[in-house]
Amino acid sequence: MSRIKPHKILEVYEDKKVRRIYTKSIVPGKVAFDERTVRDGKDEYREFDPRRSKLAAAIAKGCTNAGIRKKDVILYLGASHGYTCSFVSDMVGKEGLIFGIDPAPRVVRDLVFLSLYRKNIVPMLTDANHIEEYDDKVCLVDVVFQDIAQRNQAEIFIKNCQKFLKKGGYGLLAIKSRSIDVKRKPKGIFSEVRQALEKEFTVIDFRSLEPFEKDHAMIIIKK
């Protein structure tokens, strides 16, 4: 009998015995990031490492609703090389879609290679600060996911959620306190960002990501 069971977070799986979380791969046999895989019949599960992903860290810390569903359309700001993006790709499935935005040509090149076999990822070389650069290329989305190390990260997130997030949709903001102010205590920064978000949206979850990610937190909102 398989030890891999559905997690309380939709489209995520777990092995409670070894305390690991997984997604079910939409492209079995393809490993892009040297992640562990587990076979169960025809299905292949990829280990989602909380030390390599803020989303995995939030789930490992007890997040109750990540807001990501099968067939969702996602606006992913700060997609980088695509590690977390590849797991979100599994979560939304082949009928879902991810607009993966990043301003760095080197990492977008990696994202393009990933998208050659993960067909639900659309890499976009653009800056999340400048909505006008992709306004005509992105539709309304079910989820905005942001992982950006910039001082104005909360402002970027709010602006993109106001523009692209459907009513009833979810937003996930990975806050990097040291990118906002290296001299201030992270707790104070997290509190300020949360207050700013609460003026616009309903905050449904807040998690410090320690010990997986130092001075980071995840805030999840609903529009």
Image: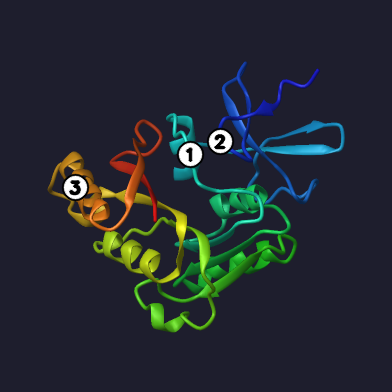
Cα gap from disc 1 to disc 3, whole angstroms:
23 Å
Q: Residue furthest front?
A: 167
Q: Is residue 146 left or right of residue 177?
A: right
**Mark 2 touches mark 3? (CB < 8 Å):** no
> Where is the N terminus found, in terms of image quarters?
top right
Q: Residues within 10 Å of mark 1 (few under 14, many from 20)?
A: some
Q: Secondary structure at mark 3?
A: helix
Amino acid at circle 3: Ile
Q: Secondary structure at mark 2?
A: loop
Q: Position of residue 52 (x, y in %)?
A: 49, 42
> In the rendered image, which residue does mark 2 sit on?
9
Q: Residues within 10 Å of mark 2 (few under 14, many from 20)?
A: some
Lower position in the chain sequence, tag 1 or tag 2: 2
Quadrant housing residue 152: bottom left
Q: Is residue 196 visible?
A: yes
73 above or below 10? below
Amino acid at circle 1: Asn
Q: Position of residue 211 (x, y in %)?
A: 36, 30
Lower position in the chain sequence, tag 1 or tag 3: 1
Amino acid at circle 2: Ile
Q: Residue furthest right?
A: 41
Q: Secondary structure at mark 1?
A: loop
**Mark 1 touches mark 2? (CB < 8 Å):** yes
> In the rendered image, which residue does mark 3 sit on?
189
Q: Which mark is residue 65?
A: 1
Q: Position of residue 174 (x, y in %)?
A: 37, 49
